[in-house]
Image (tube, rainbow, N blue to C red):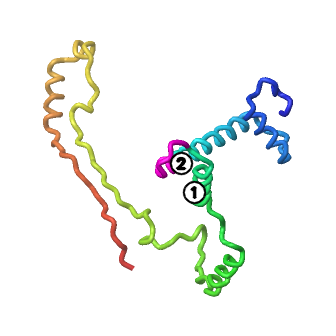
Amino acid sequence: MAGEGEEDMPRDAKIVKSLLKSMGVEDYEPRVVHQFLELWYRYVVEVLTDAQVYSEHASKSTIDCDDVKLAIQSKVSFGFSQPPPREVLLELAASRNKIPLPKSIAGPGIPLPPEQDTLLSPNYQLVIPKKSASTEPEETEDDEEMTDPAQSSSQEQQTSELPSQTPQRVSFPLSRRPK
């Protein structure tokens, strides 16, 4: 990867490649360089935008080194968080581990929490559509010519005798089951 077209590569891309090489990364896809450049440019733009805001707040006409330092400092302190020291974590773990875990009554499969503690309880609202005469297959002109007129009038009587159904709404409310 290191020797592919380095003479026509931008200076920033060469810097990213040299950083990767200094860290011992020899084999990588060419997209990695572009991704690092995008991350780098985005970070620089955000820092300089913050520095410009700090400069305007201080009623300065230009951005100076202190504004950039303050922008980087605020980005580091609010954007990246350091984990607590090891001693604090060990102390927290010891105090948490003093309380024993509850005995589990494990059955077959994965144990699940009680139903009232989950969001998986059934809550359905179904609308049963009205069955209409339009669901029957439509007749084409060829079918009408071939059918007997007496037979078609008996079919019309059968469809008019069907009871008209209105849509029904069925719902299952969320409630706790009695134990």
Instruction: Quadrant for the N terminus, please.
Output: top right
Q: CA distance from mark 1 to mark 2?
A: 9 Å
Instruction: Quadrant for the C terminus, please.
Output: bottom left
Percent position of residue 47, x then y: 58, 47
Question: Callout 2: helix, strand or loop?
Answer: helix
Residue at image position (45%, 67%) is: 118
Instruction: Inspect the magenta stretch and tell me whether residue 128 lies in it.
Output: no
**Label 1 vs 2, first from the N-terminus:** 2
Number of the label disc, if any, that sits on residue 50:
2
Number of the label disc, if any, that sits on residue 156:
none
Along the line of sight, which residue is nearer the eye, 167 or 111?
111
Percent position of residue 40, x then y: 66, 42
Along the line of sight, which residue is nearer the eye, 104 or 151?
104
Residue at image position (15%, 43%) is: 163
Along the line of sight, which residue is nearer the eye, 35 or 113?
35
Residue at image position (50%, 42%) is: 61
Verify CB contact (< 8 Å) between mark 1 and mark 2.
yes
Which residues are the magenta region? 53-62
What amino acid is at disc 1? Ser
What amino acid is at disc 2? Asp
Percent position of residue 126, x then y: 30, 51
Name the residue tied to disc 1: 74
